[in-house]
Image (cartoon, helix red, strand yellow):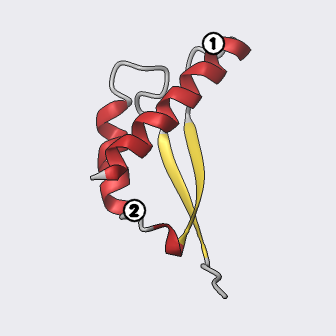
Amino acid sequence: MHEMAIAESVLGLVEETARREGFLRVKEVRLEIGRLAAVEMESLRFCFDAVVRGSVAEGAALAIDETPGTAW
């Protein structure tokens, strides 16, 4: 399940940014994911909720903008 690895990477970026900018809490995380990215959105939401516990993003909403895929 690579959605767990994605969620952990997103949290790492959020925590790094929070340290650098002095945030104490994050209320929303917004991602843009293409339809051809092979990401199961509900699995990603579940994993995100699990990995953010005890972090600056605990309780944050996960907003996912699903973009159309393009291929040639």
User: What is the x, y in percent for residue 22?
Assistant: 68, 11
User: What is the x, y in percent for residue 36?
Assistant: 51, 74
The image quarter containing residue 20 is: top right
Indicate whether 43 appears above or below 15.
below
Which residue is found at the position 51% from the left and 27% from the top?
Answer: 12
User: What is the x, y in percent for residue 60?
Assistant: 47, 36
Q: Secondary structure at mark 2?
A: helix
Q: Which residue is mark 2?
A: 41
Q: Which mark is residue 35?
A: none
State which quarter of the image contains the C terminus.
bottom right
Which residue is found at the position 56% from the left and 42% from the top?
Answer: 29
Within 10 angstroms of label 1, few (less than 14), some, or many (20 or more) residues? few
Frontmost residue, 7 versus 55: 7
Indicate whether 61 appears above or below 11.
below
Look at label 1 and name its amino acid: Arg
Look at label 2 and name its amino acid: Met
